[in-house]
Image (cartoon, grey):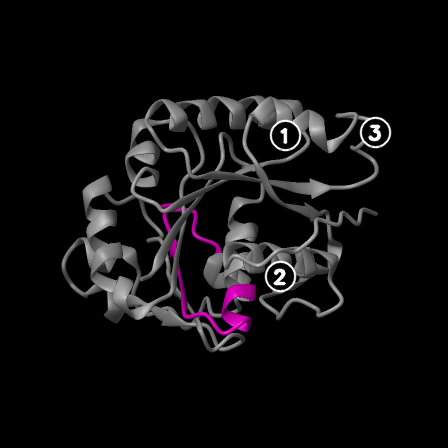
Amino acid sequence: MSKMIAITSGKGGTGKSSICAGLGYTLAKQGHRTLLIELDFGLRCLDIMFGIENEIKFDLGDVLNGKKSALEAVAQVPMASNLNILCAPKTLTPVTAEQIVDICRSVKKYFEYIIIDTGAGINSHVFDIVEQANLILVISTPDPICIRDAALMSDEFYNRGNKSQRLIINKISKKVIGEALVSNLDEIIDTVGVQLIGVIPDDFKMTVATGKGNPISPDSDALRAFDAIAKRLGGEFVPLTVKTS
């Protein structure tokens, strides 16, 4: 049985796509057949993050207009043999939640994990897609605006009956914890009201790797954090350690 995971946030700028890329990369490196589906229509970036922007022949738009099946439009990522992506179209394309759900159903027997990189924001379209997922990963940074928006989005998920939620706190550094924006991680967790599954440090090495489309350095603190989250998704007990710079 494949596991469908939706990655979402209340606003843009939380690093949602980077988390999608990092988590998909580590799941694939752990041996899991993984598919990333990108829904940021007109703003796609996963192809650049994985260094295959010139190798994408088809995208989600080709699937939606019936030119290709979902499996035909999937691109394999060379840096992680178990990782595949279905890129968002470069232009805005009409889509319904039902179409995305049907696409996931059509390919689920081929993958262990299907990770959906949703568009940011609180709107019915995102909710209709996300509520079909087995697990919702709510992304927030330490910024008070992001924290509030994550709490609002999570509350709406709970109101709709989506109780399978976990929180990822991204872009953590000593500059924002205890000194500037928030006093500690518990403040974020309590405000959002979702159980924590992982903390991603603000890591320059990962920023450079994804910006250039290179493999993430093995000594990247962010990569280690993603590796721990991926193992937790598989049911392993991995203690939470937070390393900030």
- Callout 1 amino acid: Ile
Which segment did they paint magenta?
26-45
Find residue 189 and name its label.
1
Residue, disc 2: 227
Of pointers 1 and 3, the one earlier in the residue sequence:
3
* 167 sits left or right of 207 in the view: left
Q: Nearer the viewer, residue 210 or 31?
A: 31
Where on the picture, by quarter, is residue 85?
bottom left
Q: Is residue 156 visible?
A: yes
Q: Position of residue 56 (x, y in %)?
A: 37, 68
Q: Residue at 63% across / 57% down in the picture? A: 228
Q: Disc 1 vs disc 3: which is toward the camera?
A: 1
Say which element carries label 2: helix
Between tags 3 and 2, which lies in front? Answer: 2
Q: Are marks 1 and 3 in contact (CB under 8 Å)?
A: no
Vertical side of 92 occupied by 110: above or below: below
The residue where tag 3 is placed is 178
User: Residue 35 in the image: x percent, y percent?
Assistant: 39, 63
Secondary structure of the residue carrying tag 1 is: helix
State which tag comes first along the sequence, 3 or 2.
Answer: 3
Under mark 3, the amino acid is Gly
Q: Residue at x 48, y 54 (%)?
A: 45
Q: Classify the position of the N terminus by image quarter.
A: bottom left
* Amino acid type, label 2: Asp
Mark 3, Cα crowd under 10 Å, few <14 / some 14-19 / many 20+, is few
Asked if marks 3 and 2 touch (Cβ < 8 Å), the reply is no
Neighbourhood count class around disc 1 (C-alpha, 10 Å): few under 14, some 14–19, many 20 upward:
some
Q: Is residue 66 magenta?
A: no
Q: Is residue 28 magenta?
A: yes
Q: CA distance from mark 3 to mark 2?
A: 26 Å
Placement of 238 over or under 191, stated as above or below: below
Q: CA distance from mark 1 to mark 3?
A: 15 Å
